Each structure stands twice: as C-alpha cells, then as structure tokens.
Image (cartoon, rainbow, N blue to C red):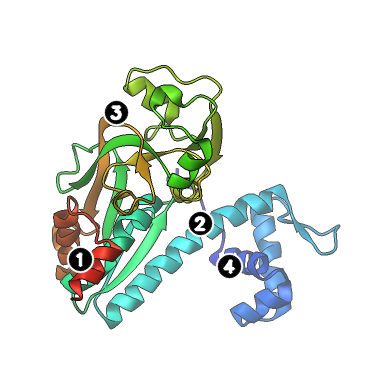
C-alpha cells in the first residue's frame, strides 16, 4: 500500500518558513499572503497529526517532527533544484554534469579540468561533489567508489584501490625521524570516521600488509577525505593515500610516500552514463576523455609552464 503524501502547497509553505525564518519571509518568497502561509502550514500539521512548530517560544522553534520533515525536504528540494537547473542549462547549451565523490572531484578531476575543456570545446562542464552516504545527485556522467557491480555492464573502471601512507615534509621535519610502518607509534594518524565499511582505514590497512596496529597511535578523525588531505598538507599527521588520486601532491613533493608497502583491493572508482546508450554525444565525449585519462598523470605547474615555451 503506497503512502499518501501531504499537499505540496503545505510542504512548500513549511519549507519556505524554515528557510526564511519567518512567515513574512516565506510569504514574500512564494508571492502569497502571510495568512495563506499560516493556513497551509496549519493544514499540513492537521494532515500529519502533530505540530511542526513549538509556538510557545518567541521566535517559534521547530519540534522534533518539524526538524525531521525539514531535513527530508531539504534533501528532496536540493535534488529537484539540481535537476531543474541541469535541465534549464542543457536546454540553453551543451552542459554536461559530472558527479562523483569529493576526493575524486577535488584531487583527480579538478587538476585536469583545463585538459577536459580543451578536449571538449563548446561543452560547459558542471561538477557535483558528494560525500559518501549523501543522497545521490546523478550527473550525466557519474563516478562512484566501491566494488564492481556485475550487473552494471556499461561501467568503466577509472582507478583501482592501492593505498599507502604519506605525509608532508613539514610533519616529517617536526618529528625528526624517518618513518616505517613499525615506527607509527605515538604518531598522528589522519583518518575518516566510519570508513572501514567502504575503503581502507588504518586498522584494515595494517591488517592488509600483515603488520600489527601500532600501539598508542594518535587518531585524528574527519568526515571528509578532502579534510584529511588538507590536514596532511598542513603538517598535522600521516594520511592514507590512494594511488592515482594524489599524484599532483606526490609529484610536487607536497606529500611524501613513506613506504613501498601498500594495500590493494578489487574496489575502485567506476564511471557510467546516466542515460546509458541514449546519452547525448557531449556526455559520451566527456566520459571517453575521463576513461582515457584514468592512467594519465595530471599536469604539474612546472609542466604547464614548460609547455608555454
């Protein structure tokens, strides 16, 4: 039995009130009167059978039910805004949206954007960065990290998963000692919360290379890989580095690989077209370029300068 959704007018009135902070602001944003906003929210509350605002406080505050609904609507409206924006822009020109994990976008795709634009002249590239576990914002070209899906015959593997530790020269100069995995005790290990289910974290990395987890390791935990790398570059500790993902930092010396040992798995970065075989030619061109560039190092600053002469 399907669930009956509340009236859309009530949902939009409630969400406008949450976003604007006042009924007056909500009315202005929807171009209706304030009493109309109040009436729609009251009808929504009656439909749901609970109060969404605690009106005993000034200013009014969301109830637990109101916060839950606001979170769901925020996610849903974000997806709708993304889709409608993509449709509008695609109608005006050759727009291709590429969506992918934040680490891949920040450290693999962005350093290669100039090359991609040169290879696909006249195409507007739109990028959506996602954290693991976020509601999927599917692009024309979508990149994901994980195990290969046997049912997804049109997926293309861009990068595999080979992982090794790295640190900045700043951090290495501060501890004043060369490091091997056996010397990681009492060192700051940068990691991501809850990562073990999806990719290597420090305990699973040490287990994969057959070494015991070092005692007294000092973990610093983040919720995004970009934050892990920013902390590593700032000299705050040792990070786990995915081969092919951080080449620009390794080639420039901003990060230093600490050991020849690495852990590998069958996981990796996989890419597919949202519309499959019916995808637009410009989306296919972007996918083909990314696929062909998967094993190609990103250009360094020195390389770009050298090409100018």
Q: Quadrant of the N terminus?
A: top left
Q: Position of residue 198 (x, y in %)?
A: 38, 35
Q: Which corner quadrant of the image does residue 178 belong to?
A: top left
Q: Position of residue 162 (x, y in %)?
A: 27, 36
Q: Position of residue 189 (x, y in %)?
A: 49, 34
Which residue is labeled 1 in the image? Answer: 283
Q: Position of residue 59 (x, y in %)?
A: 82, 64
The Cα–Cα distance between marks 2 and 4, rounded to whole angstroms, is 13 Å
The answer to whether mark 3 and mark 2 are in CB contact below 8 A is no
Residue located at (35% from left, 71% from top): 86
Neighbor class of circle 2 (other Cα within 10 Å; few <14, some 14-19, many 20+) is: few
Residue 235 in the figure: left or right of residue 143? right
Q: Which is in the foreground here, disc 2 or disc 4?
A: 2
Q: Secondary structure at mark 2?
A: helix
Q: Is residue 27 above or below residue 252?
A: below
Q: Secondary structure at mark 3?
A: loop
Q: Secondary structure at mark 4?
A: helix
Neighbor class of circle 1 (other Cα within 10 Å; few <14, some 14-19, many 20+) is: many
Which residue is labeled 2 in the image? Answer: 75
Q: Which is in the foreground here, disc 4 or disc 1?
A: 1
Which residue is labeled 4 in the image? Answer: 12
Give the mark nearest the N terminus, 3 or 2.
2
Residue located at (56% from left, 63% from top): 7
Q: Which is in the foreground here, disc 2 or disc 1?
A: 1
Which residue is labeled 3 in the image? Answer: 261
Give the mark nearest the N terminus, 3 or 1.
3
């Amino acid at each position: 039995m399907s669930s009956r959704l509340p009236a859309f007018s009530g949902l939009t009135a409630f969400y406008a009130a949450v976003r604007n902070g006042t009924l007056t602001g909500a009315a202005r944003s929807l171009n209706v009167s304030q009493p109309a906003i109040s009436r729609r929210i009251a009808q929504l509350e009656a439909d749901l059978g609970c109060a969404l605002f605690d009106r005993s406080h000034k200013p009014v505050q969301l109830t637990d039910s109101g916060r839950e609904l606001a979170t769901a609507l925020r996610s849903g409206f974000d997806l709708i805004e993304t889709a409608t924006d993509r449709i509008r822009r695609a109608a005006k020109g050759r727009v291709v949206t590429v969506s992918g994990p934040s680490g891949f976008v920040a450290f693999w795709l962005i350093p290669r954007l100039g090359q991609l634009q040169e290879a696909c002249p006249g195409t507007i590239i739109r990028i959506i960065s996602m954290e693991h576990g976020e509601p999927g914002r599917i692009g024309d070209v979508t990149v994901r990290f994980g195990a290969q899906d046997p049912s997804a015959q049109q997926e293309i593997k861009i990068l595999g998963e080979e992982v090794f530790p790295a640190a900045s020269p700043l951090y290495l100069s501060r501890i004043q000692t060369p490091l091997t995995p056996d010397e990681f005790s009492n060192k700051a290990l940068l990691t991501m919360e809850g990562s073990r289910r999806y990719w290597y974290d420090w305990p699973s990395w040490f287990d994969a290379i057959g070494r015991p987890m070092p005692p007294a390791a000092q973990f610093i935990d983040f919720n995004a890989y970009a934050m892990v790398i920013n902390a590593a570059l700032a000299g705050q500790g040792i990070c786990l580095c995915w081969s092919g993902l951080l080449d620009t930092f390794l080639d420039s010396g901003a990060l230093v690989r600490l050991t020849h040992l690495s852990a590998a798995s069958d996981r990796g970065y996989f890419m597919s077209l949202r519309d499959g075989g019916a995808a637009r030619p410009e989306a296919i061109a972007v996918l083909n370029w990314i696929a062909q560039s998967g094993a190609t190092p990103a250009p360094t600053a020195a390389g770009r300068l050298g090409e100018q002469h």
